[in-house]
Amino acid sequence: MSKGRAFVQRNTRLFTVALFGSIMFVTRLFVPAPIDRMLIAVDAVLLALSALFVKNFGAIYVATVGGTLTSLWRPSLIPFSIIYALLYGAFVDIFIRLFKVKATAEGVDRNKLMMAMACSTVAIGYLSYYATTMFPQLIQASIAIDFIVAFMGPVTGAVAGYAAAYLWNKYLKSIVI
């Protein structure tokens, strides 16, 4: 590979990370808390696509950009925004690797991507829920909220995985970054 092509690929990856991270931030910008937490499906689709485009640590990079921009908008939540975003990106990258999801020119395995995203979404859901309820005792834990997290985490992740697989297989598989 020539130096010029490597430079273009690196810049394209950087642009993709910046674009996807900025979209994550914009979805938080116009929607008030706590309703913005329901937009995790948008984050999940962007993180899945970034893991497919930017092979190594793509979701971590995008989540870091999105979490950092969000923390600048809401400075009182700086540590939480960055840590949770970074962990969500790490979970996505880890589960995509564990489920051996491969993005090729032929497409991506929809079921594997759905499972990877469902696992990563439920993992970050439980982690963030229990970090805010059990550790500091800010909110009283309830069985109802436990069931909501247990049900909505995998459902949201699976839907996001399906959407990312559909977008990849239909429109994005021929794009080389």
Image: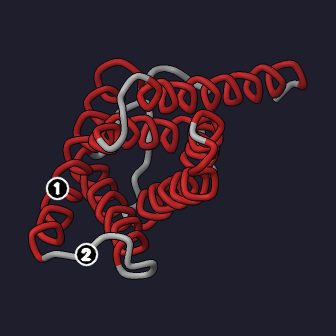
Amino acid type of disc 1?
Met
- Report the mark closest to the observer, 2 or 1: 2
| Vertical side of 74 occupied by 136: above or below | below
| Vertical side of 146 occupied by 4: above or below | above
Q: Which residue is mark 1?
A: 152
Q: Which residue is mark 2?
A: 140
Considering depth in this image, is 157 or 100 the residue closer to the camera?
157
Q: Residue at x 47, y 62 (%)?
A: 91
Amino acid type of disc 2?
Gln
Q: Which numbered disc, 2 or 1, marks the residue that appears first in the sequence?
A: 2
Q: How many marks?
A: 2
Residue 2 visible somewhere in the drawing:
yes
Q: Secondary structure at mark 1?
A: helix
Badge number at residue 53: none
- Residue 120 position in % (x across, y down): 37, 61
Residue 21 occupies which quadrant of the picture? top right
